[in-house]
């Protein structure tokens, strides 16, 4: 049932209508909005926005959490195998829910392959690892994926090939994967915002993929003069993704391009696009690079609780493996 927005202080029927029109359908959406976002709506002052947000946070029970509660939330984290044991080990078990994981690398380094494989593995119970005390079993029943494709590289036939490689029905994977082709950053952001509606419509979305996160932004906002605007929009997009991960216990995967680092004399000569906005919003950050033949190297270089390390995996006809 929809929340009754007029229960919030200072929200009468006409303000409620405006909020709904702007997409703020429930308390949670308001609780996690910024003051700036709400004051974009005509007739809402900064003071009123702040009051609404605080009240909505109380109603949604968002605020300080004790360490015990946080530990309980951590226990509900579940993991998905990448297909490579070595890569899973670097991730301490697999791709983590309630997090955003970024794979950056040059063209052909295997980013899109990992995204395809994740959609396949999501449909295999044996590739999902959960702490049975922390995760309600039904939560992971009939999981579905959303794949936002900005480069036109999603290939259903590749999904089928990988599924068959693992002995499962490719059609099952395709039936449980929503694909949206985004031609520009506005479409990309809108699709991400619509995922919540899919979930509320009864789809158990547990995996969200943005392949690629930055290409539309990079194409549309060229030149120094556009950088601030680009970063602001990208920041909003990352916030949407983080919210999905947190609120719905989803795994969020994003791919990213790399650019030459102009001032690098030592160390990495390449860096992921998106600067601090992406860096701070992604929980796990990987660099992928090509190695001999079908081998690829994944280097984890930024994680809150895991050491930096490398894994070698392979991309074969059957998919990602050791
Ligand atoms: P990107 O990092 O640009 O997204 P991809 O994930 O698309 O790169 O990786 C492309 C590479 O994956 C190809 O160069 C090839 O080595 C490998 N690959 C793609 N499809 C297959 C397949 N059907 N069988 C074996 N290897 C494949
Ligand atoms: Mg790709």
Image: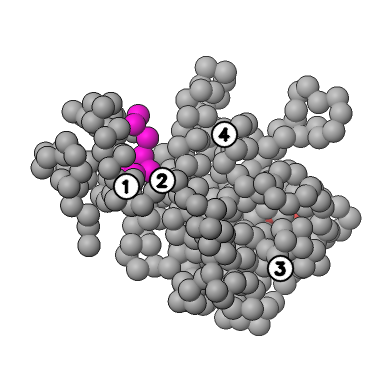
Determine the residue positioned at 12% across, 40% down: 12
Examine the structure image and report whether residue 168 is included in the region drawn in magenta: no
Examine the structure image and report whether residue 32 is included in the region drawn in magenta: yes
Element on which disc 4 rests: helix
Q: Name, please, the residue furthest toward the top.
A: 225
Element on which disc 2 rests: loop
Characterize the local packing of mark 2: few (<14), some (14-19) or many (20 or more) Cα atoms within 10 angstroms.
few
Element on which disc 3 rests: loop
Q: Indicate the position of residue 244 as horizontal and vertical percent values.
A: 46, 53
Q: Is residue 137 above or below residue 268?
A: below
Determine the residue positioned at 56% across, 59% down: 71
Q: Nearer the viewer, mark 4 or mark 1?
A: 1
Q: CA distance from mark 3 to mark 2?
A: 37 Å
Characterize the local packing of mark 1: few (<14), some (14-19) or many (20 or more) Cα atoms within 10 angstroms.
few
Mark 3, residue position: 83
Q: CA distance from mark 1 to mark 3?
A: 41 Å
Q: Which tag, 2 or 4, sits closer to the chain's start?
A: 2
Q: Nearer the viewer, residue 276 or 67?
A: 67
Q: Indicate the position of residue 195 as horizontal and vertical percent values.
A: 40, 55
Mark 4, residue position: 277
Q: Which tag, 3 or 2, sits closer to the chain's start?
A: 2
Mark 1, residue position: 58
Q: Indicate the position of residue 235 as horizontal and vertical percent values.
A: 50, 35
Q: CA distance from mark 2 to mark 4?
A: 24 Å
* Image-quadrant location for residue 248: bottom left
Q: Is residue 186 visible?
A: yes
Which contiguous range is marked in magenta?
A: 29-36
Classified by dominant secondary structure, the portion drawn in magenta counts as: helix
Q: Tags 2 and 1 in contact by the CB under 8 Å rule? A: yes
Q: Nearer the viewer, mark 1 or mark 3?
A: 1
């Amino acid at each position: 049932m929809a929340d009754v927005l007029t229960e919030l202080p200072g929200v009468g029927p006409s303000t409620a209508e405006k909020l709904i029109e702007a997409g703020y359908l429930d308390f949670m959406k308001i609780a996690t909005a910024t003051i700036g976002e709400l004051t974009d709506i005509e007739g809402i002052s900064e003071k009123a926005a702040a009051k609404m947000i605080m009240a909505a946070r109380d109603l949604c029970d968002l605020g300080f959490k004790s360490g015990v509660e946080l530990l309980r939330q951590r226990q509900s984290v579940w993991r998905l195998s990448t297909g490579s044991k070595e890569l899973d080990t670097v991730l301490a078990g697999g791709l983590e829910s309630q997090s955003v994981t970024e794979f950056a690398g040059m063209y052909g380094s295997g980013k899109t392959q990992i995204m395809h494989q994740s959609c396949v593995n999501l449909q295999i119970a044996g590739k999902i690892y959960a702490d049975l005390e922390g995760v309600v079993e039904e939560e992971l029943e009939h999981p579905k994926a959303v794949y936002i494709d900005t480069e036109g590289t999603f290939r259903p036939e590749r999904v089928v090939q990988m599924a068959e490689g693992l002995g499962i029905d490719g059609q099952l994977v395709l039936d449980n994967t929503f694909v949206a082709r985004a031609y520009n950053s506005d479409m990309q952001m809108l699709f991400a915002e619509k995922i919540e509606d899919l979930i509320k419509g009864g789809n158990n979305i547990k995996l969200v993929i943005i392949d690629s996160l930055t290409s539309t932004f990079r194409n549309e906002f060229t030149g120094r003069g556009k950088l601030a605007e680009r970063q602001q929009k990208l920041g909003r997009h990352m916030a949407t993704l983080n919210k999905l991960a947190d609120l719905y216990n989803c795994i969020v995967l994003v791919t990213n391009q790399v650019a030459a680092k102009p001032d690098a004399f030592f160390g990495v000569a390449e860096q992921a696009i998106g600067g601090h906005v992406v860096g701070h919003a992604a929980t796990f950050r990987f660099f992928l690079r090509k190695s001999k033949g079908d081998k690829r190297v994944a280097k984890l270089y930024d994680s809150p609780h895991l050491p930096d390390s490398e894994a070698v995996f392979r991309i074969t006809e059957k998919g990602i493996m050791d």
